[in-house]
Image (tube, rainbow, N blue to C red):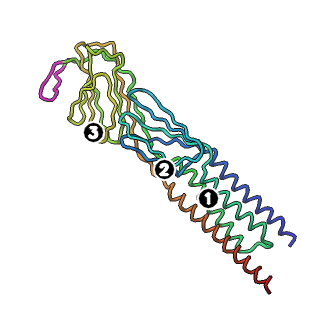
């Protein structure tokens, strides 16, 4: 039985190494999640990191607001904002990962230390331990898939010069005006922002045509669109303006994630692992109790 001590020591080292690897990998992982705010958003606490920063970006006012959460953070509710989107950055330690890893490691270490021989039970528990850590690692990596992927487009600063004199239909009337036209076809959920820089109210204005519905926007407009034809018209009394038009949009596509599935599987494995050890411990206690009575 002399070989048993080195084997047990090796198993103890492997368990500790694997546990530290998972916790360190989780600590190094930083997530960035983006959400459109065309509706109120509910951000689940599946990845409750030790530090969470919520940034609200308002394209119309060109301002940003930040909220920093520390410690265990529950679900985050973000209100609807027709001109904003949210960016969430989660970093530090995930409390679920730390809790599950600590429970698994502590239980298997106790069993390895107490048992005098390498029994089938230890092999089963090691297999459960490795399976749980493997799923936990996938869960950590899956955190990158939460929220929405975003495509960005910026027109640059378009000089409003040499504009064309044309007839512009507006609802039930038609006007003659110098104009610049920009057309876009929106297919995804999109936050669009357009503005006239160095705007002169008495010389120019924005007219928007959204799938046949015209809206006067004056110098700027920001809103969400989905499956729409967008026409942006700059109308002016002069052919050349000392102004520029800027068009910016963000297209949001929901990401597919298996985070909840991986979390559930890990939880089941932790419960199975804990139950197996608890049942084994109870049997040992009952057996020793009977031997004492005899």
**In the image, is residue 240 above or below residue 24?**
above
Q: How far apart are the alpha carbons under marks 3 and 2? A: 31 Å
Q: How far apart are the alpha carbons under marks 1 and 3? A: 45 Å
Q: Measuring from the top left, give residue 217's x and y in whole percent.
A: 27, 26
Magenta residues: mostly which secondary structure? strand
Marking on residue 228 = 3
Examine the rendering and report whether any part of residue 180 can be seen: no
Is 95 in the magenta? no
Residue shown at 72% from the left, 79% from the top:
286
- Magenta stretch bounds: 166-176
Examine the rendering and report whether any part of residue 70 can be seen: yes
Foreground mark, 3 or 2? Answer: 2
Q: Earlier in the sequence, mark 2 or mark 1?
A: 2
Q: Earlier in the sequence, mark 1 or mark 3?
A: 1
Is residue 284 or residue 175 the one in the foreground? 284
Give the quadrant of residue 82. top left
Position of residue 289 in the picture relative to residue 270 (left or right): right
Is residue 145 or residue 77 the one in the foreground? 77
Is 170 in the magenta? yes
The secondary element bearing badge 3 is classed as strand
Mark 1 — residue?
134
- Categorize mark 1 by other alpha carbons within 10 Å: few (<14), some (14-19), many (20+): some
Position of residue 248 in the picture relative to residue 132 (left or right): left
Contact, mark 3 vs mark 2 (Cβ under 8 Å)? no
Marking on residue 44 = 2
Position of residue 69 in the picture relative to residue 216 (left or right): right
Task: List the single residue furthest toward the front.
Answer: 293
Q: Measuring from the top left, give residue 187's x and y in whole percent.
A: 32, 41
Quadrant housing the C terminus: bottom right
């Amino acid at each position: 039985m002399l070989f048993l001590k080195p084997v047990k020591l090796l198993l103890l080292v492997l368990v500790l190494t694997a546990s530290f690897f998972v916790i360190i990998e989780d600590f190094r992982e930083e997530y960035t999640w983006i959400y459109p705010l065309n509706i109120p958003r509910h951000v689940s606490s599946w990845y409750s990191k030790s530090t969470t920063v919520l940034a609200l970006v308002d394209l119309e006012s060109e301002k940003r607001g930040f909220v920093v959460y520390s410690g265990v953070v529950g679900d985050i509710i973000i209100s609807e904002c027709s001109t904003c989107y949210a960016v969430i950055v989660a970093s530090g330690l995930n409390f679920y990962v730390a809790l599950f890893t600590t429970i698994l490691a502590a239980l298997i270490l106790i069993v390895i230390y107490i048992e005098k021989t390498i029994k089938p039970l230890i092999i089963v528990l090691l297999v459960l331990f490795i399976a749980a850590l493997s799923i936990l690692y996938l869960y950590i990596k899956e955190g990158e898939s939460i929220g929405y992927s975003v495509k960005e487009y910026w027109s640059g600063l378009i000089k409003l010069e040499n504009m064309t004199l044309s007839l512009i239909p507006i609802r039930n009337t038609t006007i003659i005006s110098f104009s610049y036209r920009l057309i876009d076809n929106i297919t995804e959920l999109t936050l669009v922002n357009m503005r006239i820089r160095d705007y002169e109210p008495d010389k120019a204005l924005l007219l928007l045509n959204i799938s046949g519905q015209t809206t006067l926007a004056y110098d700027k407009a920001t809103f969400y669109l989905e499956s729409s034809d967008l026409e942006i018209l700059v109308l002016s009394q002069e052919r050349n303006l000392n102004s520029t038009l800027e068009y910016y949009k963000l297209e949001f596509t929901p990401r597919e994630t298996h985070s909840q599935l991986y979390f559930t599987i890990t939880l089941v494995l932790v419960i199975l692992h804990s139950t197996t050890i608890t049942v084994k411990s109870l049997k040992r206690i009952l057996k020793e109790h009977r031997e004492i009575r005899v």
